[in-house]
Image (cartoon, rainbow, N blue to C red):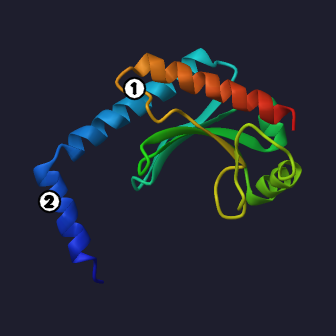
Amino acid sequence: MNFNRQALNAYKKLIETTDLQEGYQEFIKLFRFLRTELKKELPAYDFSGQIVENNMDFAYFQLTDSELKAKGIKIQVVFVHKIFRFEVWVSGYNRKIQCAYYEKLKTQTIPYVLNNNPNQVDYIIKKPLNESLDLSDGFGVLEKIKASVLECVEYIKTV
C-alpha cells in the first residue's frame, strides 16, 4: 500500500519545526478539563464515553438527559480544528431522527445554524461560539459552553 509522501513529509516538518505537538497536547488538556467540569456542574446529564478525537477534523464529547434521550437527541460539545472554534451541536441518535427534526425546523426562523443535509452531517442544529474566545481562560470557556449547552437543550425540548 502506498501513502502520500508529500503529506507525510509536511507532517514531519511541522513536528520538527513547530510546537504543533505541544499545542495539540494543551488543547486536549483543555478539552478534558471542559468535559470533567461540565460533568460536575451538570449532574442531571449523562456524559457518554470519553472525548472523541476525530483525526484533527473535530473533537467532541456528548451528553444527554432522560427527556432528550426519549426524543432520540444528544448534545455534543465540538471543537472544529480547521476553523479553531467551539460549537454546541444538537444531534439525533440516528439519521432518521435528524431528518425528522430537520423537517420540523426547515420552514422556521431559528436562532441556530440548521443543518441542510441531515443525512450527511452529524447535527440537526448548531450554535457556534465566539471565535475570539480566550482559550487560555478555562473557566471562561467553561461558562460559555455551559450556557450554550443549556440554551440548546431548552430550545430543542420545545420542538
Residue name at image x 42 percent, y 43 percent: 84
Residue 91 in the image, given as x and y percentages of width and height: 70, 46
* Label 1 SS: loop
Q: CA distance from mark 1 to mark 2?
A: 28 Å
User: Can residue 155 be spotted in the picture?
Assistant: yes
Task: Name the residue type under label 1.
Answer: Asp
The quadrant in which the C terminus is found is: top right
The residue carrying pointer 2 sits among few (fewer than 14), some (14 to 19) or many (20 or more) residues within 10 Å by Cα, namely few
Q: Which residue is mark 1?
A: 134
From the image, state whether disc 1 or disc 2 is nearer to you: 1
Q: Is residue 11 left or right of residue 68?
A: left
* Residue 42, quarter of the rendered image: top right
In the picture shown, does residue 8 fall above or below 113? below
Sooner in the amino-acid sequence: mark 1 or mark 2: 2
The quadrant in which the N terminus is found is: bottom left
User: Can residue 37 be spotted in the picture?
Assistant: no
Residue 77 in the image, given as x and y percentages of width and height: 56, 37
Q: Which residue is mark 2?
A: 13
Residue 101 in the image, given as x and y percentages of width and height: 83, 50
Residue 95 in the image, given as x and y percentages of width and height: 74, 59
Task: Name the residue type under label 2.
Answer: Lys
Task: State the residue lying farthest toward the left.
Answer: 16
* Residue 25, quarter of the rendered image: top left
